[in-house]
Image (cartoon, rainbow, N blue to C red):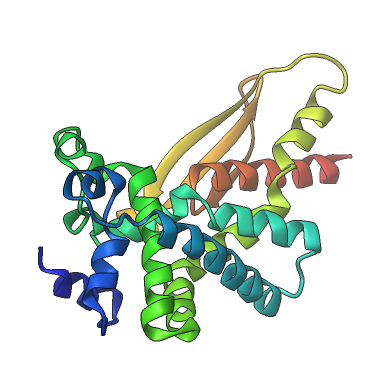
Amino acid sequence: MELEKLEEKIGYHFKNKALLKTALTHTSYANEQECDSNEKLEFLGDSILEFVSSDYIYENYHHLKEGEMTKVRAAVVCENSLYKVAKKHNFSDFLYVGKSELVSHGNTRPAILADSVEAVIAALYFDGGFETAKKFIIENLKEEVEIASHHVGMKDYKTVLQEILQEHGEVEIKYHLLRTDGPDHDKTFYTEVRCNGKLLAKGEGKSKKGAEMSAAKQAIEELKREK
């Protein structure tokens, strides 16, 4: 495998190429070849990722409270976010996995890919220093932080709307996806919310959940104006 292509994608050329290979070596391959796997690097990379993310959120999102910062970090330092990073750089093309994993397409499994991103972060730290690892993390996750920071304060809007509407008894509340716009990596979702068939409000967001929260928020504001 041409690891140089991956180096081009992530924007860093390793002095110690073996370090990068180890970061991409799954235990299934390591057991077959009797070499080191990426498990230890993954362990360290997880800690570096959490610290850098915490520092970035603290320095750039002063309006968030401590509990909100924790929620934003949790939304970013997770398998789904890291899987997106791995897909962005085509990590699956460069992973070293065992024969059994390869047959079952283990090189495309989200958990394996997410772990490899953490391992690569640690490899960047050892090869290029803390600032190199930090640069990779921020460049690849700052958009996820931005999205999470917008959604963190919207977490209760659907619950609040439900409580308002069900104050005098059970009602049927439904959210309906109207359409999506934009490319796969930057979609915008448009949603409406109805109560017993009556349109209450519409909303939009960068995810289906975000659009539903936006619609719920608009509905709450409309109901307040009607009082």
Between 187 and 59, the residue placed more toward the observer is: 59
Q: Residue at 61% x, 34% y: name it.
A: 193
Q: Residue at 23% x, 65% y: name it.
A: 21
Q: Quadrant of residue 110?
A: top left
Q: Position of residue 96 (x, y in %)?
A: 20, 53
The reply to whether residue 153 is in sight is: yes
Q: Residue at 46% x, 72% y: name it.
A: 137
- Position of the N terminus, as image quadrant, is bottom left
Between 106 and 37, the residue placed more toward the observer is: 37
Horizontally, residue 136 falls left or right of residue 25, namely: right
Q: Residue furthest top?
A: 170
Question: From the viewer's perspective, is residue 221 above or below residue 3?
Answer: above
Q: Residue at 19% x, 42% y: name it.
A: 98
Q: Position of residue 20 (x, y in %)?
A: 27, 69
Horizontally, residue 23 falls left or right of residue 141, namely: left
Question: From the viewer's perspective, is residue 182 above or below residue 225?
Answer: below
Q: Residue furthest front?
A: 34
Q: Quadrant of residue 88?
A: bottom left
Horizontally, residue 225 falls left or right of residue 113, namely: right
Q: Residue furthest left?
A: 1
The reply to whether residue 118 is in sight is: no
Q: Position of residue 93 (x, y in %)?
A: 17, 56
Q: Position of residue 171 (x, y in %)?
A: 73, 17
- Position of the C terminus, as image quadrant, is top right
Horizontally, residue 128 falls left or right of residue 3, namely: right
